[in-house]
Image (spheres, grey):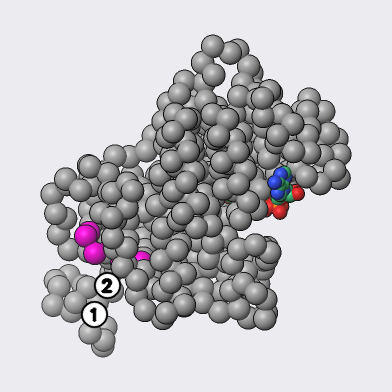
Amino acid sequence: MPSRETTRVAVVGYGYWGAKHVRVLCGLPEVEVTVVDQRPERLDEARRQFPTATTAGDLAEVLDHVDAVVVATPPTTHAQVALHALGAGRPTLVEKPLATSVEDAQAMVAAAAERDAVLMVGHTFEYNAAVWKLKEIIASGELGSVLHIDSARLNLGIYQSDVNVVWDLAPHDLSIISFLLDDMPSSVSAWAHHDLGHQHVDVAYLALDFERIGTRAFVRVSWLNPNKVRSVTVVGDRKMAVYDDLSEIDRIRVYDRGVQPKAAVGLHLTGGPVGYRTGDVVSPHVAFREPLLVQDSHFVECVRTGRRPDTPGERGLDIVRILSALDHARLTGHAVPIDWHDADRPLPARLADAAPVLAGVVLNGEVAS
Ligand SMILES: NC(=O)c1ccc[n+]([C@@H]2O[C@H](COP(=O)([O-])OP(=O)(O)OC[C@H]3O[C@@H](n4cnc5c(N)ncnc54)[C@H](O)[C@@H]3O)[C@@H](O)[C@H]2O)c1
């Protein structure tokens, strides 16, 4: 609401992640927070931790008295809660994944458009300075053509009750990879398994083909791994880069390493069909700010100014479309094409109109700042 000094935000869902939103929002200037959770014990905890926040057991109790809503409830409830908020014209930030079906995500985007209300999806990694730096490195051409991207998000849990490991963890990888490449996959394949006899798959291997730009990505997600791994490796034909989200000091490393056919000059040749080139490993400085703080500050700015978010509802819908195609691929065992020209929102004009990119990709896309 542009004319108000203070922005009143309701955070619906005070669980593991909603509590982080409340911490971040309570620290922002001129923001008042109302915590909404259907569990009274969570509201007691919220009052203990954040005495300045008010609390309520149901969004309906407070919707008339807030300017904006953050939805941090389990994914299967996102659509219902967000449609309630959007129906009242409230700018709404919804955690990833935007929804658990394409139809629900479309309904949310349509409701926002109907009310001219801001709808933003919480793709936290698109507000992460290390991801911006990696995008900048790819766009600069330093890595050469991107041959493939390999992303791994492994841990012991946290097992979710309402979605499987693909819908829980892979939204991050899909948002990071499509953001880095500035493109969407033309087809997807998936293999997944439920090791614990649990109703939801807990280990999955995903493949994304970016036919238009001649590259591909592989994603591993698991709730059943002893080690926590959060890494994205970009393999270029000149250099390679690794983004390790768990590293405090060198989140990004650029390896001047590669493999080339033996015929190439100046290589140290081995007995095999290729020669290996090894050079420096460089870790560029990344001025890091907590991504959730960057994201929620951006949301408050959008609420105050009416600005379109950097991750609008349509972006969330795009990722839900990929997740749905991955479900289909997993169940049928076949690669599933995704026709973005049939989507409600086809590829951005700047992508559709771009000159065809030759095999591999050296992108000239915008660098987030
Ligand atoms: N962006 C990220 O990095 C990130 C990380 C973790 C989780 N998440 C997302 O955050 C969301 C919440 O995940 P979580 O792990 O905190 O879940 P959680 O189960 O820990 O918490 C959910 C809370 O919502 C409450 N709730 C459920 N339905 C409600 C309703 N209709 N009204 C009010 N309260 C309700 C529950 O009582 C619970 O306290 C999920 O969408 C998840 O995908 C995002």
Q: Is residue 153 above or below residue 252?
A: below
Q: Residue at x 67, y 29 (%)?
A: 63
Left of 263 or right of it: where is 112?
A: right
> What amino acid is at disc 1?
Val
Q: Secondary structure at mark 1?
A: strand
| Observer-nearest of 49 and 227 | 49
Res 57 quadrant in image? top right
Residue occupied by mark 1? 274
Specify the label residue 22 is tagged with: none
Specify the label residue 259 is tagged with: 2
Counting other residues with Cα less than 10 Å from the Cα at mark 1, is it few (<14), some (14-19), or many (20 or more)? some
Query: Which span of residues is magenta-colored?
Result: 208-213
Q: Earlier in the sequence, mark 2 or mark 1?
A: 2
> What amino acid is at disc 2?
Val
| Observer-nearest of 334 and 206 | 334
Q: x and y percent of residue 264 in the render?
A: 15, 73
Q: Is residue 135 visible?
A: yes
Q: CA distance from mark 2 to mark 1?
A: 6 Å
Q: Is residue 138 visible?
A: no
Q: x and y percent of residue 279 in the render?
A: 32, 62
Dots 2, 1 in contact, CB < 8 A: yes
Q: Is residue 51 above or below residue 20?
A: above
